[in-house]
Image: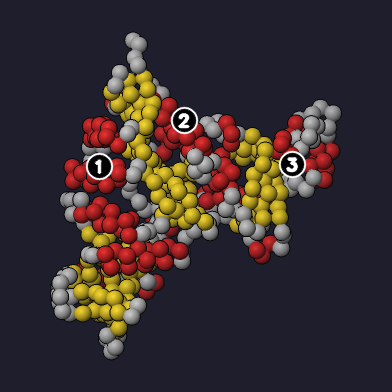
Amino acid sequence: MNTNACVRYLPDGEKNRTRELWTEAFPEDSRQFLDYYYSEKMRDNRVLVKEEDGRIVSMLHRNPYRMAVGDREEDIDYIVAVATAADSRHRGHMRDLLGRMLRDMYAEQMPFTFLMPADEAIYRPFQFAFICDQESWEESEELSVCAADGKAGEAGRIREQAGTRTADSAGGVPQTGLSQMGDSQIVRVKVRGDNDVREAARYMNEWLRGRYQVYCLRDREYVERLVKELESENGFLEMLVETAAQTGSAHLAGLKAVWGLEKQEQRLLMTDESLSRRREPEKLKPSIMARIAYLPGFLAPVRLDPACGEAELQIYLKVEDPMIPENNGSFLWTVGADGSRLELLESEIGPGEGPEILAAADVSAGAARKRLSDRGVRLTDDSHGVLEISIQNLAQWIFGYGPAAAKYRAQFPQIRTWEGVFIDEVV
């Protein structure tokens, strides 16, 4: 049967048409959460759909985030709500959407994209690969006493004074608990008001910067949305304010978020070192998959380790990318102290001196290696001097995750990859 099929981005006025498909594909999401999502996240995202005879049969949402990536900041889309109508599955609709999305991202020069898979097998054929575990932190014994006892504190509020935070028993915001820790006291205060929101964003960024190199940046709008998201599932974000018993001086020592309609669970915990501990590595599971989109931009922040003693490193790189033709090919990758650049090898090397010399019948492997070496190209022990790598293994190497990262770090210890990825966003 002939149908009129169309792949397009929905204008803002049509985005609500996807709610029916969301409800069908993700019945576990509450009405309150969807109300939040469609009122907040739809304001600045892009929704790519495939329609047949005017009906939406498949969709994905591109939710934008500003991210710290190494020592740079990048605009990166988080892919959510990937779904196909039950009566239209296994017909290639999602392949059409992901192919269009990746081509668009290359044209937009977006370095990479990421998602949290419900089933990793769906995304591996499109060269998505895991780049991190779901980091999880738990309260220290001293801090958990407060929640376990459930003690209600005095009414109180936290105010800014000369750049420090101090507790004041006069006024409005109820403290949700108290915990005594030696010569100090921890007060739990729900985040309310613009000052609290800005202070929470500042603390999150400082906490993340001290532990990770890839994460979503927090600002006032981010925290305001987070609070609304938590409230949609009966949750809240609270500040952990540590007050010195003798002087009364106070500082923000952490943040905690919980949510859950039926059962409350921890959504977030970021604290000073003494108040929490990271869960054991064996308890962690892979959580986020990423896909390189614009290869030159993805590699641009990668640089040499200052301790390696080299000013520049050149690698002959042959990348396999079956989805994005521009990423699929042979490149000269030059890595320096401040970043790197990627060039098509053919544009820099004349006939007989490009990648074809490695396959030419009249050129031995030794001669090929010498010819490339004479041009200052770094040679490796595998593939006759060519570093052949799939786009997904390249992602894992640079993100510092999995067996691919261990293999290529050992081969190229001069290259500084990203140490630590933290992505805990839900949508």
Whether residues under marks 3 and 1 lie with C-beta atoms below 8 angstroms apart, the answer is no
Distance of label 2 from label 3 (alpha carbons): 32 Å
Q: Secondary structure at mark 3?
A: helix
Q: Which is in the foreground here, disc 3 or disc 1?
A: 1
Which residue has dot 3 on it? Answer: 385
Q: Residue at x 53, y 59 (%)?
A: 71
Q: Residue at x 18, y 54 (%)?
A: 234
Other residues around mark 2 within 10 Å, as few (<14) / some (14–19) / many (≥20): some
Which label was assigned to residue 38? 1
Mark before the other along the chain sequence, 2 or 1: 1
Q: Residue 106: x, y in percent? A: 52, 37
Q: Quadrant of the N terminus?
A: top left
Looking at the image, residue 409 sits to the left or right of residue 275; the answer is right
Amino acid bearing label 1? Tyr
Distance of label 3 from label 1 (alpha carbons): 52 Å
Mark before the other along the chain sequence, 2 or 3: 2
Residue 165 shows in this picture: yes
Q: Secondary structure at mark 2?
A: helix
Which label was assigned to residue 99? 2
Q: Residue at x 33, y 55 (%)?
A: 222
Amino acid bearing label 3? Gly
